[in-house]
Amino acid sequence: MSIEATAATALPAETRAGNALRSVARRIEWRPWTAFAALLALWFAAHHFGWVPAKYLPSPVAVVQRLIREVTAGTLLHDLHETLRRNLSGLVIGVAAGLALGALLGASSLVGRIVGPTVLAQRQTALFAWVPLLAMWFGGGDTGKITFIAVAAFQPVVIGTWRGISLVPTTYRELSDVLLLSRWNYMRLVALPHALPMIFTGLHGALIYAWLATVGSELFLNISPGLGGRLNEGSQLFEIDLLFLVILLFGLIGLGFNTLAERAEGLLIRWNNR
Amino acid sequence: MNAPFSAPVPSIATALPALDIRHVSKAFVVDGKAVEVLADISLSVEAGSFVSIVGASGCGKSTLLRLILGLDLDYAGDIHLDGQPVEGPGPERSIVFQEHRLLPWLTVEGNVGAALLHSGLDAAARRRSVAEHLELVGLEAFAKAYPAQLSGGMAQRVAIARALANRPRFLLLDEPLGALDALTRLRLQGELKRIVAHEGATAVLVTHDVDEAVFLGHRIVVLHPRPGRIAAVLEVPEEARADRSSPTFVALRDRVLELLGVSLGEGRAR
Amino acid sequence: MSLAETLDKPAFDTSPRDGAAADTAARRHTRRPGPSRPTALGSVLLGLSFPFALLVVWWWAARLGLVPEQILPAPATIYETVSSLITDGTLATHLEVSTHRVLVGFGLGAVFGLVFGAAAGLSPTVRAFLYPPVQAVARVNVLAWMPLLTLFMGIDEPLKYVVIGWSAAIPIILGTARGIENVSPAFRELGRVLHFNTRDTLRLVVLPGAVPSIFAGLREGLANAWQTLVLAELFASFEGLGYLMTWGRQLFQLDLVIIAMIVVALAGLAMDLALRWVERRAQPWKRETRDVH
């Protein structure tokens, strides 16, 4: 209930103005930012007053300077490009495979019942437990990394697609029976539209896991151009400004992917409910 | 019905009405615009009587109950109970909602007992009151059951027992039987009438079922919608309350339906 | 790792409730596809048939020498390695180390997550100030923080407890806060009508209403704890199941890697089942929902 109650008599003008002000204040939510600001202030202070040895904590200024240096030298953009290339390659492969298997599991109840439990059980395997195995099968280079990312993206998509298609409510199924829909038309008109939100949820998960796997693969597998390589470099050479810079970038990219997915999902849901 | 507890006798009504609603108006703000839901409602109810409020959906019936309950204090006008203004929920008022609103994690007796937590009674007295009221609604055998194990009619009876457990002097009923099937509804209407009479509470029923309003109420208040306002107040003769097929009942029902804008002529003519 | 996001999305939830719903759907209607099963036994057999078939193919291929040992060791080899790992106690030691880490980390994360989540769920002010930053932090996976944390904490046990606890806490915070926040307003209103004080409201309305969401958070947190354990042990460790994998990889002993993977999965599954059991015990009103009338 988001309706505000007021007395029945016509609203006094100042109340209306007050409401308008309050609603603007509500739209520009400032309070969450205080935590970020406090953190930044703490960082400045900790550096300035030497609470933490400078070798562990660079000043925010140093991190920004490092960013400028890396960008002008072109190194950072190259690494970013490599990392994103791997991430997207793995993502595309994993999502395509997940959609195909998920649709198969959902479309045929027999296949679903035979293979489904194995797919669910496989989800229990911690994602990173795949790293050593895939490294031995595909090597620690690009192939191994992209395969790992694809495995990470595959899991949520296959489950989302499968569930979405198979959990169509009985009422819709009965309706399709009454309308004598063929299996193909049932998939096209009933099952897929119904599954769309869940498929999108799966894609959202894939985006997150794939990014996690991208970071992980660059840390755990062979060192190669990419942000993870720079992270290793920063930590091994004790270049603390580089380390902070890369961590911030990892975070921001992850945040970006997430926001993107949420926006897309929001749009889709609105479109679906039209 | 001669249970061991005594009920206040309705006829000892004092000059002061038990519930007095004077010039109550209420508006909601939706998208920055004020929408009036109740306009200048005035109504007094004497102690021990049963008032039915009928109207189409959107006429503000439920809002009026919320105001009497004290859940919402933001309105124009006055509501007095025994001469005291309403300043919030109080133990002398209770309500049965349209959905039974039983807490799913408490057993039947736990749900009824929840109404007595701050009644000032000791544990034994509370247990006794719970048992008595479950017996009153005929569910003593289901004291240990969870709400999910009950049918809709049973759950609503538990809700009625919960509303009565604290011996309220005012019982507010917000379409209490609206979610039930027609047969269960008819059966529970009879039970509700018996129970309310037995407890001697002053009752305000909100409903859109005209038969129910006539069968249960001493008086019927007909509301017109948008904004909700009183169109008519009708006395219900004892004869109509006693027998659903009596000519008085049918005549009164038709009169209410007409006031609500339902045309009866066409169906009969053809 | 915070797979916290997945909490918003019950699509990955494999809870029995979904299964039950699907069961009823499938029972009513068998022609259309469904993930579930007319009879329990039949579905178990069908579900096992696939891994069993894989095993047979694997065994056959190994026997005919179709797959080199370096790519996939024969089932017999795996069996031998497992037996020797069990008899000399190696497996038990590593399993114990890993389980201990998960339990400590998860315990820390759960306590923090429940307290903070409850605060955020109960107080709109706490929520407004701290919830978005927590969500932002949740979205930066713990893996990225690890090199930084290493600088401060070294690579010993504290690091592992912190990263495991961290990854476990996030879904627990979100689940608890959301559970409390989403307690039905109708029940809150009922509390007002029945004159509940704050304690009654917490005990009778808020807490029981939030239980399902809290448990969803706990289960997600536990899964995260196992994920992060493997991560932390791959990253820096000299014992534990993750270390067993790294060691197997370095020795080119694929059997060790595969065994460790399977044990991790089984241990995670066992703990998840235990948590589900607790969840059922915590909600007796959900156990017997058959009609009695």
Image (cartoon, coloured by chain):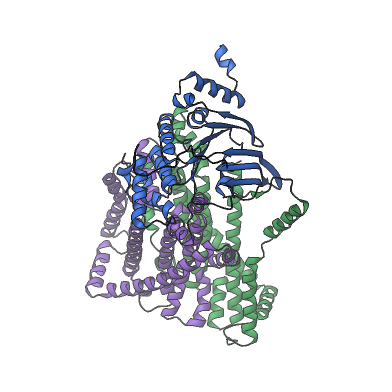
Nearest to the observer: residue C125 or residue B180:
B180
Q: Is residue B165 left or right of residue C188?
A: left
Q: What color is chain C drawn in?
A: purple
Q: Is residue C160 above or below residue B109?
A: below
Picture coordinates of residue B192, whole percent (x, y): 43, 36
The quadrant in which residue C23 appears is top left
Q: Where in the figure is residue C248, as x and y percent of width and height?
A: 35, 72
Nearer-the-camera pick, A85 or C243? C243
Front one among B215 and C190:
B215
- Residue at 57% x, 12% y is B269
The picture quadrant where one finds residue C275 is: bottom left
Instruction: Chain B: give its colour.
Output: blue
Q: Considering only vertical position in the picture, is C274 above or below B15?
A: below
Chain A drawing hue: green
Residue A104 visible, this orientation: no
- Residue at x-position 74% and y-position 52%: A16
Residue B57: x and y, percent?
A: 58, 35
Q: Is residue B198 visible?
A: yes
